[in-house]
Amino acid sequence: MHELSPLDPKTVFFLYFWGNLFVCILIFSYSLSYASTENRKKLNTFGFGKVLLTIGWVFISLRNIVPDFISINIANTIILLGCCCETLAIISMNKAKFNKRYRVQIALVVMAMLAFNSAAILGVTISTRIVIMSLGIFAIYLPPTIGYFREKATNLFRIFYLLCYVSFEILIFLRAIYTYLYPQTEFFRQSNFDSFYSIGLFLLTLIGTVGFLLLVKEKQDLRIQKLLKDKNLFFSIIAHDLKGPLGSSLALSEILAHEIDTYSREEIKEITEMLHDSNRNIYKLLENLLNWSRMQTGMIEYNPKKVDLNSLIEENIKLNINTALNKNIDLRFESTEIVVASIDKDMIDTVLRNLLTNAIKFTEQQGEIVVSLYKTNKKAEISIRDNGIGIPANIQEKLFKINEKVIQKGTENEIGNGLGLLLCHEFVKKHHGEIWAESKLGKGSTFKFILPLEK
């Protein structure tokens, strides 16, 4: 029987180099040609990780040709940074507790870098460096692997992807154990295990990348299905909610066009005011529909900046104060401290505008609306409380849901369709915040939303 011949180290590094180069081309080609804006960021992060791994392997292959500091310290630091980018892209596919997982990944990478470079500077053996590096990579890939293992939503792509990274973790751990049990005096060692390890790592790199692309495609396909479903709901909203105010505008404009001579100045003024209200409702509905559709299709980009929330709330109160005064509503703002948060000003501006408009709409004459702002557990909580007509229990259950129809008229028969609240929900969710309503019929409502102060 023929014995297996170990792979030549140069062949191994050629495999790693060309394999990673092929993967980089595959990822960036997919990112530029097919991926959505959101997924493109994840793919670019993953691809950048592969670029760093490729550079790291090139430096390692130059061992004994370039200075040890470049082929050992810098090379392995670059590889750990590549692992960091790759794992960050992986965990970003699951948004649950992303900020916490992000910090964990950064901490693991920093500790692995410090451990390896400290060991290299102290002049430890090659075997010890390999064990430290293997355990460092194992630790870096462990959290995302466990995260996908605990995922409730399982399908063929996720199982395939999980098995790939479980195999990768096992292989890296076996590498550490083998090197510990069978120390090596030279970095380039030819053995059957090293050949098996190299081929296995090469194949898992390719398979893992394909698995990641399949996950991205699956997520994008689900997004497209949701958009198609929402599109049908948009058509139903437009057909139902625009028909009323458009019909009213048409009827009123027809009166002005053909019968204006039969009406007094006061009656004409009343008709034009009704026409103005109808057109304003149409405009507000179209504005919300446009913003909602742009949000769903990714055309509205999240652009957070440091903003004084107190000033932003006061600006919105000034914009709505005249509407409130027309109903003799006391609209005021209460806050005991200045709160600054990193937010998308336009999005939160829209949230405040919609919530204030709703509060005024559903509050009786001589009513009261209080806007409050305060900090709690590194978060900013904003509440808009009114003593208006309140929200029936059956409608409360439908708030913030696109697949539920919400119809409730204001105190002066103002038309409401709930689309503004859907928009508020999407914008607050984009900030990784929460929004909810508390209400008692006949006693008023309080809408609250929370925004993280730290990103």
Image (cartoon, rainbow, N blue to C red):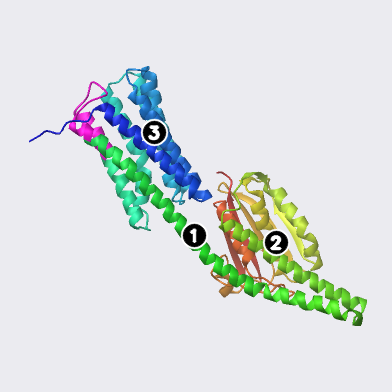
428 inside magenta stretch:
no
**Which callout, 2 or 1, points to the residue nearer the camera?**
1
The mark that comes first in sequence, 1 or 3, is 3
Q: Position of residue 104 (x, y in %)?
A: 43, 40
Q: Quadrant of the C terminus?
A: top right
Q: Find disc 3 in the rendering and name its residue.
A: 53
Please report the bounds of the magenta region as a residue range.
171-195
**Visible in this render: residue 127?**
yes
Identify the element where label 3 is drawn: helix
Q: Find disc 2 in the rendering and name its residue.
A: 356
Residue type (three-letter) at the residue carrying disc 2: Leu
Would residue 296 be found to the left or right of residue 44 on screen?
A: right
10 Å crowding of disc 2: few (<14), some (14-19), many (20+): many
Most frequent secondary structure within the magenta stretch: helix
Would residue 84 be found to the left or right of residue 138 on screen?
A: right
The part of the image, by quadrant, that contains residue 207 is top left
Q: Residue furthest left?
A: 1
The part of the image, by quadrant, that contains residue 265 is bottom right
Would residue 58 be found to the left or right of residue 387 on screen?
A: left
Residue type (three-letter) at the residue carrying disc 1: Ile
Identify the element where label 2 is drawn: helix
Residue type (three-letter) at the residue carrying disc 3: Leu
Q: Position of residue 108 (x, y in %)?
A: 40, 36
Label disc, if present, on residue 224 of the rendered structure: 1
10 Å crowding of disc 1: few (<14), some (14-19), many (20+): some
- Mark 2 in CB contact with mark 1 (< 8 angstroms): no
